[in-house]
């Protein structure tokens, strides 16, 4: 369910973005980043650890996928 300040995509996509739209979005993004920023080093460290764990999981999953798929099939010789 959209939040009170959100509108359906169809109401937003009417022509190219105007400079005022771009500036408004930049201001909103800066406010959101400031609102969610943290100065607590323990939280920052935990977030870094979680990001590293996600990278490791992605790498492991890719290796598993390659092992399951096996080598690519050999091309048939042309006649």
Image (cartoon, rainbow, N blue to C red):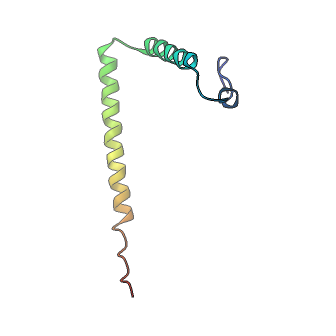
Quarter of the figure with residue 6 = top right
- Give the quadrant of the N terminus: top right
Camera-side residue of 21 and 48: 21
Q: Is residue 36 left or right of residue 50?
A: right
x and y percent of residue 32 in the render? 49, 15
Provide residue 11's location: percent of width, then percent of height: 70, 27
- Image location of residue 17, percent across then percent down: 58, 25
* Residue at position x 33%, y 12% in the image: 40
Q: Which residue is drawn at 29% across and 15% down?
A: 41
Vertical order, 26 against 61 (above or below): above
Q: Residue visible at 48% across and 12% down? A: 31
- Give the residue displayed 30% in from the left and 29% down from the top: 49
Position of 10 with respect to 69 (left or right) is right
- The quarter in which the C terminus is drawn is bottom left
The residue closer to the viewer here, 48 or 20, is: 20
Residue 21 to residue 63: above or below:
above
Q: Where is residue 18 in the image (x, y as percent from the top left)?
A: 58, 21
Q: How many marks are shown on the rendered structure?
A: 0
Q: Using the rendered view, name the quadrant where residue 44 is placed.
A: top left
Q: Looking at the rendering, which quadrant does residue 73 occupy?
A: bottom left
Q: In this view, does 10 lie to the left or right of 66?
A: right
């Amino acid at each position: 369910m959209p939040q009170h300040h959100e509108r359906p995509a169809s109401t937003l996509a009417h022509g190219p973005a105007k400079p005022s739209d771009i500036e408004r979005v930049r201001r909103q993004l800066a406010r959101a980043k400031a609102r969610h920023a943290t100065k607590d080093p323990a939280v920052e460290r935990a977030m870094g650890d979680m990001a590293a764990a996600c990278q490791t999981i992605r790498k492991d999953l890719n290796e598993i996928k390659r092992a399951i798929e096996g080598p690519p099939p050999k091309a048939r010789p042309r006649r």
